[in-house]
Image: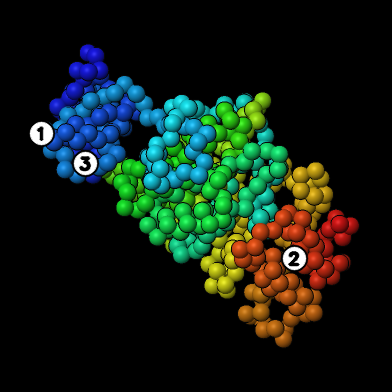
Amino acid sequence: MDLITREYRTVTTLSGPLLFAGKISGGSLGEMCVINVPGGEKRTGQILQLMGDHAIVQVLQGTSGIDSDAASVVPTGETAKVAVSPDVFGRVFNGFGEPIDGLPHIIPSKYMELTGLPMNPASRQKPDFFIQTGISAIDGLNTLVRGQKLPIFSGAGLPANELALQIVRQAKVAEAESFAVILGAMGITSREAFFFRRALKETGAMERTVAFINEVSDPAIERLFTPRIALTTAEYLAFEKGYHVMVVLTDMTAYCDSLREIGSAREEIPGRRSYPGYMYTDLASIYERAGRLKGGVGSITLMPILTMPDDDITHPIPDLSGYITEGQIVLSRSLNRKGIYPPIDVLPCLSRLMNLGIGKGKTREGHRTLADALYSAYARGIDVRRLVTIVGEEGLTELDRKYLSFSDEFERRFIGQGAEERSIDATLDLGLELLKTVPERELIPAARKG
């Protein structure tokens, strides 16, 4: 049966964004469909599941107003694709890749499949170049490396979006290299969307940025497309145009909640905290698209941001993200209450690939040693701070007082840099200056030499 006549008037049930149809003999998993609605309206759908000749179709514009008796499904024979072009810079799109900035559609250079192509592990190039974010707690202690997946774990009400915007504005690589930033925002409010768009324009970062924005009032299905459209665009710019691309995705918790909503509509058996049992695989299909290819010029570096419900780092979303990615940046509610920005709690933070991107010729010789010394002194100061609650400051030794003073200054000056942009040299110089308040005999031997 050719494509023109493959129209099925077999819709049986509607549930949330899902449409259930029977006797679908010509469809395939992941195939896009046209949903004909009485009155001439056409909506777009995708086949999520096939069970014999029965299909579950997710309708991208929702099923509101569809009459199951009069609607029809027409498989197109095509998978989901996105238009890509070098002209995307400076543009703002919705979660489906449609322009929302008042400008016309881009003239596509080509169309690429939304799912992308899995990167063969044997073809991966080891990440080994430093990306400067301008934020000391990241650059100095949890360095971001080109091709890395480094998530930010936030809590409700913490300034994760402000931090994301600061990273988008400040991130840079070597001057001779082409650098681009892609922002994928999911489930944000209209106020947050306005904040992102205005701030990007005011700072001038929009010239090298592409934004895909899905608001909370948009269909939940759109949130499942947003990160994949952002990463497909990144793959085109990185592997075909030679750009080093940083992709910032916020908020992956909204994405996972939509995944749970769709799973509930499909009546799937839930897993942990009612999230789908395949959520690990689904997140991996997003996160693992970051990296570098052997013999290639470009790269994709991924910084997903997620909100930990109830500040619980063991919640399934941060827990599974931590397994897949290469470290984490954790925001602290206690630092935020003190007015410290960015409120990065460096002790539980980790960048597993840091050592590959630092050192002589990349950041500075002795970077690793300095970072270790700062970690050690700050951890000792936090221990002393806890001791004060038990014995009071009167019970502290002179050495304990020095560590307590160091931890306070470290939080105030090193972590709490505000909106200031710091070079890696300024960050490391400040770290050395702060360590001078700690007795030399207390430093690790390598740090004394530095």
Number of residues whose C-alpha sits closer than 10 Å to that of mark 3, classed few (under 14), some (14–19) or many (20 or more)? some
How far from the left and from the top, in percent, is residue 119? 55, 29
Label 3 element class = loop
| Relative vertical location of residue 237 with respect to residue 134 in this rendering, above or below | above
Residue bearing mark 1? 69
Q: Residue type at mark 3: give it.
A: Thr
Q: Name which residue lies at 65% across and 41% down.
A: 146
Question: How far apart are the two marked residues, 3 and 2, measured between alpha carbons?
Answer: 58 Å
Number of residues whose C-alpha sits closer than 10 Å to that of mark 1, classed few (under 14), some (14–19) or many (20 or more)? few
Q: Residue type at mark 1: give it.
A: Asp
Given the current orientation, which residue lies at the most extreme front position? 103
Label 1 element class = loop
Residue bearing mark 3? 63
What is the basis of the colouring in this image? rainbow
How far from the left and from the top, in percent, is residue 175? 70, 43
How far from the left and from the top, in percent, is residue 22? 18, 27
Given the current orientation, which residue lies at the most extreme top position? 1
Q: Earlier in the sequence, mark 1 or mark 3?
A: 3
Residue bearing mark 2? 377
The quadrant where residue 226 appears = top left
Closer-to-camera residue (108/376) = 108
Q: Earlier in the sequence, mark 3 or mark 2?
A: 3
Question: How far apart are the two marked residues, 2 and 1, measured between alpha carbons?
Answer: 70 Å
Closer-to-camera residue (384/449) = 449
Camera sees residue 313: no
Label 2 element class = helix
Q: Name which residue lies at 13% across and 36% down.
A: 39
331 sits to left or right of 39? right
